[in-house]
Amino acid sequence: MPTAILRSRSLIRISGADAQDFLQNLITTDVDALPEREARPGALLTPQGKILFDFLIWRDGSDFLMETDLDQREPLIRRLTMYKLRAAVDLSPAEEGITVAWGDDSGKGLVVDGAFAVAGIPLRRSPGHLAGTAETDDTAEAAYDALRIAAGLPLSGRDFALQDAFPHDLLFDKSGGLSFRKGCYVGQEVVSRMQHRGTARRRVVLVSAAAALPASGTEITAGDKPVGTLGSVNGERALAIVRTDRVGDALARNLPLLASGVPVTLALPLWTGLAFPAEQQEAEP
């Protein structure tokens, strides 16, 4: 059972009689439908539908735990507090550090990571340092990061900048982090309109190459036209957020896709069921 301790991650505890309604009316995740012992991705949006904070959320008895980057914890608590008003809700910092375990025998009794599960990877999470696990090292954390990249699961600060991406860009509509069935929440009108009109044009893709990829932030181009930017990089594999219409056009025209001169192949994660426009046209009878 491979494990890694993610020291850059931390938790916020949300408790109180109004905690569930407070969250249900605020964040993208359907909190009312959140199963026991399952973590799902979520976001707090701007009124314009952009991601202000991203996180994982799960139930802990009658409370809820939000996992986010340590440097985002206090700003997120402050932002949530702005919406609390007179609601019976308590927001407090909890554990620092998250243990993740993966594989078929991964940490029974821990919290299932729902996004990894959608991607077909059994991975579980636990606050703090899981008893019985060895101290983490850079190799263990790098192995987890490689797994995350292979699954097509992005992180803010690594794959996108906060306030610069919509939930659809990050595949939240496919990974369980975005609800279209519950009532209103901040930014809901914008993301619902994108969903129903089919106007999502940017998506996370898997990047592969025959040589080591350049650094995160490098543009991916087709001809002289930028189609996206590299995010998390792991040797010859990476994530990127790209314009799918531009990639589809490049594929249709057989234009090479390059990242600082390195030829790359782009693929939408299989678990999303998505395809580039050119691939959709080829699939039609």
Image (cartoon, helix red, strand yellow):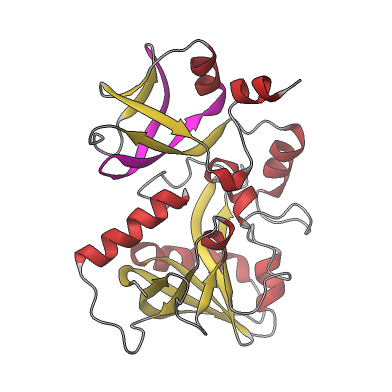
Front residue of this view, candidates 25 and 247: 247
Residue drawn at (54%, 33%), measured in percent from left and top? 202
Locate residue 84 relative to residue 113 in the image: left or right.
Answer: right
Locate residue 95 relative to residue 90 in the image: left or right.
Answer: left
Please identify the quadrant where the C terminus is shown: top right
Does the rendering let one see residue 7? yes
Across and down, in percent, residue 203 comes to 53, 37
Across and down, in percent, residue 10 comes to 39, 72
Q: Is residue 263 above or below residue 273?
A: above
Locate residue 93 relative to residue 268 in the image: left or right.
Answer: left
Across and down, in percent, residue 9 comes to 36, 68
Q: Is residue 41 above or below residue 103?
A: above
In reply to whether residue 192 is colored magenta, the answer given is no
- Region rendered in magenta: 224-245
Front residue of this view, candidates 11 and 100: 100
- Which quarter of the figure has residue 49? top right
- Outermost residue on the left side: it is 138
The mark tally for this picture is 0
In reply to whether residue 234 is colored magenta, the answer given is yes
Please identify the quadrant where the N terminus is shown: bottom left
Front residue of this view, candidates 199 and 94: 199
Locate residue 21 relative to residue 5 in the image: left or right.
Answer: right
Residue drawn at (30%, 83%), measured in percent from left and top? 133
